[in-house]
Image (cartoon, rainbow, N blue to C red):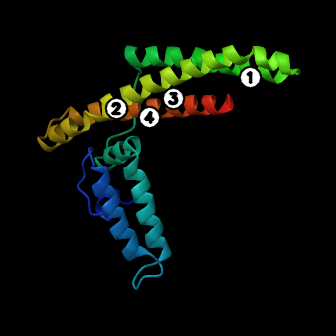
């Protein structure tokens, strides 16, 4: 992919302002739109792809790492992340087990008797979702510090940014799994 930052006229930084990103995307998409003079569909698609890349922090960081030609490597999960994963697995398994029980319930009474279990599962998933969101927010608050480190030439900043990107990716995936589990309970 071409440099998404350059395509939208934005600085190559980890902490992009959402409003500035959206304004840059709107301006670029207006000029690239096929109905505008000089615009074409391929250019409009590139602008939209750049926006999608930069909008999600984990994708933006991955793109930033690619632009810095940081080779991909496996990032081990630290104890705090492993603890979250340790909560997620059993919660998702409990939902799967409950859904089997709910599907097997054929009478109205049997379904009604499952309501308290369903409510407990919902509460557990919502609490886990809140915890995941809090962790994600805390990680995102570190982005300006990474920009400072990168601009100062800190040689360890890119390796640390790679770890942050992996953590954000894990959290994003786990949040999606929690949302999916909550939807399955409806």
Residue on which disc 4 sits: 169
- Furthest toward the right, the residue is 106
Q: Position of residue 41 (x, y in %)?
A: 50, 74
Q: Alpha-carbon neighbours of circle 2 within 10 Å: few (<14), some, or many (≥20)?
A: few
> Nearest the camera: 8 or 120?
120
Asked whether residue 94 is in view, the answer is: yes
Q: Gap in Å between the C-alphas at discs 2 and 1?
A: 31 Å
Residue at mark 2: 137
Q: Residue at x 52, y 24 (%)?
A: 126
Q: Which mark is residue 37?
A: none
Q: Secondary structure at mark 1?
A: helix
Q: Position of residue 55 (x, y in %)?
A: 39, 50
User: Mark 4 and 3 residues: CB-CB less than 8 Å, in contact?
Assistant: no
Looking at the rendered image, the disc whose residue lies closer to the viewer, 4 or 1, is 1
For the C terminus, give its image quadrant.
top right
Residue 99 horizontal side relative to residue 2, left or right: right
Dot 4, crowdedness within 10 Å: few (<14), some or many (≥20)? some
Label disc, if present, on residue 99 of the rendered structure: 1
Q: Earlier in the sequence, mark 1 or mark 3?
A: 1
Q: In this orientation, which residue lies closer to the viewer: 42 or 87?
A: 87
Q: Nearer the viewer, mark 4 or mark 3?
A: 3
> Marks 4 and 1, how far apart in space?
27 Å
**CA separation, marks 4 and 3?**
9 Å
User: Which quadrant would residue 113 be assigned to in this image?
Assistant: top right
Residue designated by label 3: 174
Please report whichever mark, 4 or 2, sits nearer to the chain's N-terminal start: 2
Do labels 2 and 1 touch, CB within 8 Å? Answer: no
């Amino acid at each position: 992919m071409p440099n998404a930052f350059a395509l939208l006229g934005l600085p190559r930084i980890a902490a992009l302002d959402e409003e500035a990103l959206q304004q840059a995307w709107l301006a670029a998409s207006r000029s690239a739109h096929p109905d505008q003079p000089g615009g074409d569909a391929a250019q409009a698609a590139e602008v939209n792809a750049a926006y999608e890349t930069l909008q999600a922090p984990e994708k933006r960081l991955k793109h930033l790492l690619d632009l810095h030609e940081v080779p991909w490597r496996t990032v081990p999960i630290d104890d705090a992340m492993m603890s979250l994963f340790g909560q997620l697995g059993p919660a998702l398994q409990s939902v799967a087990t409950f859904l089997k029980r709910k599907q097997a319930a054929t009478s109205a009474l049997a379904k009604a008797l499952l309501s308290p279990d369903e409510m407990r599962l919902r509460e557990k998933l919502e609490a886990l979702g809140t915890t995941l969101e809090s962790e994600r927010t805390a990680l995102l608050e570190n982005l300006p510090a990474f920009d400072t480190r990168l601009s100062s030439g800190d040689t360890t900043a890119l390796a640390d940014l790679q770890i942050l990107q992996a953590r954000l990716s894990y959290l994003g995936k786990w949040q999606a799994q929690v949302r999916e589990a909550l939807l399955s309970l409806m």
